[in-house]
Image: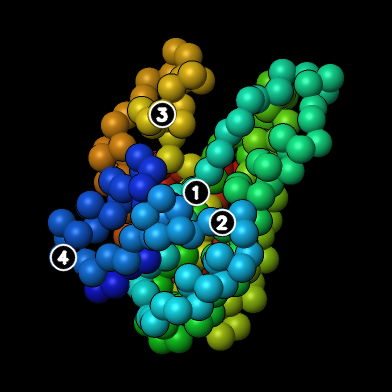
Amino acid sequence: MKRALVISASGGIGRAVSTALVARGVSVTALSRSGDGLDLTDGASVARILGALDGPFDLIFVASGALGEPEKSLKDLDADAMAAQFAINTIGPALVLQHAPRLLPRKGRSVFAALSARVGSIGDNRLGGWYSYRASKAALNQVLRCGAIEIARSHREAIITALHPGTVATSFTADYRGRHPAVPSETSAENLLRVIDGLTPDDSGNFYDWQGERIAW
């Protein structure tokens, strides 16, 4: 791997992934809202900033995500809050994926990875609740699945994947870890990069956890 693009690089996981890649000798383009004005909820912002980039990138890693206030029941649903979840968790990564055919190499192995979450798995859902977050991550998974099918037609060695990082000790999860053991961002980054390293084009369009185990849709 020679070049990587990390989106939402100012967050805990994004920053750690960028640092780990640099330590490997990879040339990293790290973009964020705070540092570069990349607003994933604004299509014009994504088009302007990503449209100015020159590829190819061997890895595009999208670390964006927002949790909001998880709903415990249907009575807690709010249209505006739900739309905000979809804007950052689904639409933003989809707009980045839109640039992947131009930014990934036509020949040779490449990876587009976006952070999803196990709670976005419909098959794994046993507890309910968290409607907006679950639904927005499930929608992201479908976007990545569709993108994998389309991009494979022109980029035969490209891998498009959804990744579950596990519970990571960041400000994002501070209020919701409960009794779940959490790992530092640096450990999570190494875990995720290890999974990415092990993927092949046959794995494209699937959903994996930080251990490399496939998660049901």
Asked if disc 3 and disc 4 are in contact, CB closer than 8 Å, the reply is no
Mark number displayed over residue 40: 2
Left or right: 188, with 135 as reference point: left
Mark number displayed over residue 64: 1
Asked if disc 1 and disc 2 are in contact, CB closer than 8 Å, the reply is yes
Q: Residue at x 38, y 43 (%)?
A: 11
Q: Nearer the viewer, mark 4 or mark 1?
A: 1
Q: Nearer the viewer, mark 1 or mark 2?
A: 2
Q: N-terminal of the two: label 1 or label 2?
A: 2
Give the crowd class for mark 1: few <14, some 14-19, many >=20 residues within 10 Å. Answer: many
x, y (%) of residue 85? 66, 41
- In the depicted structure, whether residue 76 falls above or below residue 99: above
Q: Can I make out residue 77 in this image?
A: yes
Q: Residue at x 24, y 58 (%)?
A: 21
Quadrant placement of the N terminus: bottom left
Left or right: 70, with 55 as reference point: right
Disc 3 target residue: 171
Q: Nearer the viewer, mark 3 or mark 4?
A: 3
x, y (%) of residue 24? 17, 60
SS state under label 4: loop
User: Spatial distance from mark 3 to mark 1, Cα to Cα?
Assistant: 13 Å
Q: N-terminal of the two: label 3 or label 4?
A: 4
SS state under label 3: loop
